[in-house]
Amino acid sequence: MSIWVGIFLLFVLRTDGRSSRYHRYRISPLTGERIALPTPDQLEWQAQELGVLIHFNMATYVEQHDACPNDLVPSTSRFNPYLLSTDNWVQTMIDFGAKYAVLVAKHNCGFLLSPTNVTFPLNPSGEVVPYNYTVNYSPVKGVDILDEFVKSCYKQKIQTGFYYSTVINNYLNVQNDTLKEGQLNITQQVYTNIVLSHLRELWTNYGNLEEICFAPGTLDTIAKMLAELQPHANVFGGSDVTANSIRWIGNELGHAPDPTWSTGTSSGGGDPNSPIFCPAECDTTLQVFDRWFWGPHVLLRPLPDLIDVYHRTVGRNCLLMLDLTPDRSGIIPPEYANRYKELGDFIRSCYGSSVRPSIQNSSADFLTYMLVFNAPVSVDRSVIQENQTRGQVIRAYTITVLIAITKDQSEWTEVATGTSIGNKKIDLWKKGTLLVRAVKLNITKTVDVPVLKSFTVHLCA
Ligand SMILES: *[C@@H]1O[C@H](CO)[C@@H](O)[C@H](O)[C@H]1NC(C)=O
Ligand SMILES: *[C@@H]1O[C@H](CO)[C@@H](O)[C@H](O)[C@H]1NC(C)=O
Ligand SMILES: *[C@@H]1O[C@H](CO)[C@@H](O)[C@H](O)[C@H]1NC(C)=O
Ligand SMILES: *[C@@H]1O[C@H](CO)[C@@H](O)[C@H](O)[C@H]1NC(C)=O
Ligand SMILES: *[C@@H]1O[C@H](CO)[C@@H](O)[C@H](O)[C@H]1NC(C)=O
Ligand SMILES: *[C@@H]1O[C@H](CO)[C@@H](O)[C@H](O)[C@H]1NC(C)=O
Ligand SMILES: *[C@@H]1O[C@H](CO)[C@@H](O)[C@H](O)[C@H]1NC(C)=O
């Protein structure tokens, strides 16, 4: 069951046409092609690499279901996180290495994790009632979970964001068939007003948000509100409402295509020739079977699977947004916390430091970079980062290494080839671990003078 797909489809219906007013590009001095330019907010966002998407809401309390199926409106009395600790959530983010966290403020049930002042008229009586399907009508009344979350993250310099699903709201019967228990009858116009009022509260009361996810019903109003309230937020699927747009990778497996470009707005690997800079985000689960909310007896994905996910996301120029699921008591269960830490430990030990060359030089045209070692070293992979300040320009590259065969004999051999680099490209060498005297990166196709941020080699196997 996918929470993103519904949201995503709404965006797809509104394509590139209007986007140009928010996006900038330059013309390549070499080829005349358009090179999409990023905003500083997009580059900062992309450099984070690791984030979490926190699924903790009424659906956490629904038996054996990942969302809120069949128009269910569970009673607010069920939402009782008696051990709630957002500091505990943040400890797991640190152990994993997450730099940002997006919390599901409202999901399909309609339940809101914060109090709200929004009121609305019922259909047909016109009686004005409060939006009372919130944490403030639950056993933990008085707690604003969004506020606690933002404060805990702020203490550890973790950027924050909110997800607010608009496609489904059981409480307000958005699907609009017959009214079931707990559902209220309202008009479409009233629904639109409620969504806009909620977004205004979310975007006003909790400081600067780094990423926001929602489905824009009324684009112009949303665009104005964004510009006014959260001008620096990166908007998931938001290429029609802001220059700070980011895109969905197109699946929930944690597998970005190779190549994945920083440009292009449709989901998937993007388009190197698009004039729109719109980097990709790869959201996936820790639990098996694409399960987003905590579930009793749900298994966790094994560590090797998650390491593979890291290489197929961060290693392919995509942000890894891993699901984080507090249980019904309101904390991360210990075995879950442990798996996040195992993955974080792997990333830190493998990529936290590199095998240092004694000479690091580039050719005059910047198309060849070399790492030269005094004595042969064992390495099995390389990491390339492009400086995308003036756009993503590299289109293809090869990596060759000088293998030490005997004490005096060496030979060059190719270990990797690729196309998109962008924020980061990790190549696990096809020949495994090699004893090398030098490593050479050749940029074989580019639309402007390439600027590298880093080129390193590692031994992890
Ligand atoms: C509701 O209104 C009160 C009074 O204006 C204000 O203090 C409070 O912050 C508002 N709550 C929300 C969730 O916006
Ligand atoms: C919420 O408001 C509706 C409509 O006024 C009402 O029927 C319902 O009893 C209220 N629920 C709670 C928990 O206050
Ligand atoms: C909601 O109210 C309208 C207006 O009175 C009515 O026509 C409609 O049947 C009601 N919807 C439901 C699902 O009861
Ligand atoms: C429900 O359907 C009726 C009839 O098509 C429509 O007038 C009304 O606006 C719809 N309400 C919602 C909340 O979608
Ligand atoms: C880097 O330095 C090495 C050793 O001095 C030299 O052989 C090599 O050609 C240089 N590479 C580049 C790209 O300039
Ligand atoms: C790499 O570039 C050098 C010149 O900079 C060239 O001699 C060599 O053939 C290139 N290798 C590949 C694999 O393109
Ligand atoms: C990237 O390049 C820009 C100039 O285009 C430079 O100002 C900036 O310092 C570079 N950043 C890194 C991390 O190399």
Image (spheres, rainbow, N blue to C red):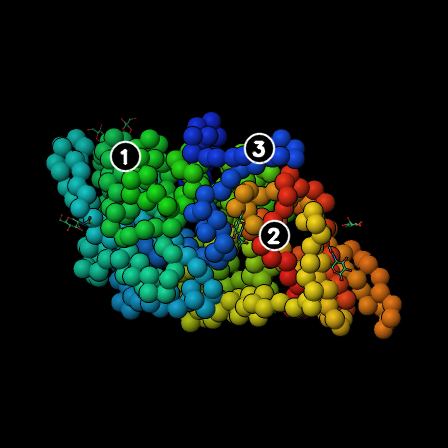
Q: Quadrant of residue 79?
A: bottom left
Q: Amino acid at mark 2?
A: Leu
**Depicted 341 relative to depicted 448: above or below:** below
Q: Residue at x 79, y 62 (%)?
A: 402
Q: CA distance from mark 2 to mark 1?
A: 46 Å
Q: Quadrant of residue 166?
A: top left
Q: Secondary structure at mark 1?
A: helix
Label 2 lies in ligand 7 vicinity (Cβ under 8 Å): yes
**Depicted 191 relative to depicted 257: above or below:** above
Are the residues flagged by discs 2 and 1 in contact, CB closer than 8 Å?
no
> Which label was assigned to residue 192?
1
Give x and y (percent) for residue 110: 29, 46
Q: Secondary structure at mark 2?
A: strand
Give x and y (percent) for residue 62: 34, 55
Q: Which residue is mark 3?
A: 27
Front tag of 3 and 1: 3
> Which label was assigned to residue 432?
none
Mark 3 nearby-residue class (10 Å; few <14, some 14–19, many ≥20): some
Q: Is residue 434 shown left or right of residue 381?
A: right
Q: Is residue 448 shown left or right of residue 50?
A: right
Is residue 195 among the parts visible in the rendering?
no
> Which label was assigned to residue 452?
2
Q: Residue at x 40, y 43 (%)?
A: 235
